[in-house]
């Protein structure tokens, strides 16, 4: 994620190590106090920057953050560091005056340094949380919410990742077992005057958001917070992870997440489904369109780049016409 690229949060132990080095090289009592104050302020500056960056963080990313972290703990960590920085400056000013008045007494310097470090130590756990948060954010895909997006969703093992690999630059892991995809992945498809972001999401089960596990909640974040179109994939084969009836329940759950965003159904694996399986899936897909869930439906062989690309191209032509006029 570009937003926090290159940002480093220092833990209390890392700050303490830097303080020891700077303190040992500093000259005079006032110089030692200055050195400790400067290290603490400089090594927590990235926390201030992170706080500012997160103020503009898109709701999609916040949803992903809240899967892994407690938002209250994040806010508490920022509050602790802000208070420590403020109090360190006050202590530095106070003890610098005392040192000058006392003629550089060593005990006064130690007391001042100890009190400054004590303030940072209180933020020890918070600094570790923020460090882990930055590492997490740096591992997230960079998605531009203002550019065209197509989210690919559906139950486990219906071919979502295969479809995304076929139509975009993304290379998500593909395997013949459910729950292979655990993270949101983004790929791009170039249409000359613009690019479409194609989002691969983890598989969903037929249950409400409050009962979802962390992996499913990542898919729900993409569906609920990212604007654009949605492709919902169905697996008509008898080897599918869940029955078509249960897959339809998942589809209605997705519809409740996306609100008024356009949703298209793609019946996958038409090359391996038998006639009865495929016929049933096509009837269901047609009913989903008639029932107002879907704007249309397609049949697809996700492994076939041409077959998959035709579907994406058609949806893009319908939903992102204004971008072709740029």
Image (spheres, grey):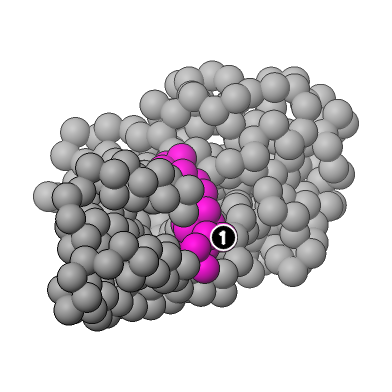
Task: Please determine whether, in this image, residue 81 is positioned above or below residue 101.
Answer: above
In the rendered image, the vertical position of residue 29 relative to residue 310, given as above or below? below
Residue 212 as seen in the image, left or right of residue 118: right
Query: Between 180 and 19, which is closer to the camera in this rendering?
Result: 19
Q: State the image coordinates of residue 148 (x, y, percent, origin top left).
A: 32, 50
x and y percentages locating residue 205 in the rendered image: 77, 52
User: What's the magenta region?
Assistant: 120-141
Q: Can residue 51 be seen in this view?
A: no
The residue lying furthest to the left in this view is 326
Residue closer to the observer: 218 or 307: 218
Q: Position of residue 44 (x, y in %)?
A: 32, 59
* Residues packed near mark 1 inside 10 Å, few (<14), some (14 to 19) or many (20 plus): some
Q: Which residue is drawn at 73% across and 36% down?
A: 179
Examine the image and state in which quarter residue 177 appears: top right
Whether 72 is drawn above or below 201: the answer is below
Q: Mark 1 points at which residue?
A: 125
Residue positioned 58% across, 31% down in the render: 161
Q: In this view, does 183 lie to the left or right of 24?
A: right
Q: Is residue 138 left or right of residue 180?
A: left
151 vs 219, nearest the viewer: 219
Looking at the rendered structure, the secondary structure element under dot 1 is helix
Query: Residue sitting at 54 percent across and 43 percent down?
Result: 184
Q: Which residue is drawn at 27% across and 67% down?
A: 105
- Can the viewer see residue 264 in this picture? yes
Magenta region, main secondary structure: helix
């Amino acid at each position: 994620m570009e937003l926090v690229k290159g940002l480093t949060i220092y833990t209390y132990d890392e700050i303490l190590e830097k303080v020891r080095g700077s303190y040992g090289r500093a000259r005079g009592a006032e110089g030692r106090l200055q050195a400790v104050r400067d290290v603490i302020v400089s090594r927590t500056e990235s926390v201030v920057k992170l706080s500012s960056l997160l103020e503009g963080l898109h709701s999609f990313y916040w949803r992903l953050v809240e899967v892994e972290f407690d938002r209250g703990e994040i806010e508490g960590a920022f509050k602790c560091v802000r208070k420590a920085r403020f109090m360190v400056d006050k202590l530095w000013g106070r003890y610098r005056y005392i040192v000058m008045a006392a003629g550089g007494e060593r005990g006064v310097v130690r007391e001042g340094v100890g009190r400054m470090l004590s303030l940072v130590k209180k933020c020890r756990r918070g600094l570790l949380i923020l460090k882990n948060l930055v590492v997490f954010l740096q591992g997230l895909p960079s998605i531009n919410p203002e550019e065209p997006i197509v989210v690919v969703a559906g139950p486990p093992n219906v071919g979502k990742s295969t479809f995304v690999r076929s139509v975009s630059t993304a290379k998500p892991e593909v395997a013949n077992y459910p729950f292979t995809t655990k993270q949101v992945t983004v790929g791009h498809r170039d249409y000359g005057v613009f690019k479409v972001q194609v989002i691969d999401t983890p598989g969903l089960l037929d249950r409400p958001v409050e009962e979802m596990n962390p992996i499913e909640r990542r898919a729900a974040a993409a569906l609920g917070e990212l604007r654009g179109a949605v492709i919902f994939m169905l697996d008509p084969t008898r080897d599918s992870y869940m029955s078509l009836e249960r897959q339809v329940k998942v589809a209605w759950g997705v519809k409740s997440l996306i609100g008024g965003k356009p949703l298209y159904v793609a019946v996958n694996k038409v090359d391996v489904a038998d006639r009865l399986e495929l016929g049933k899936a096509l009837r269901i897909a047609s009913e989903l369109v008639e029932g107002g869930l879907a704007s249309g439906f397609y049949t697809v062989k996700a492994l076939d780049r041409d077959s998959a690309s035709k579907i994406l191209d058609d949806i893009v032509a319908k939903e992102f016409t204004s971008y072709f006029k740029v």
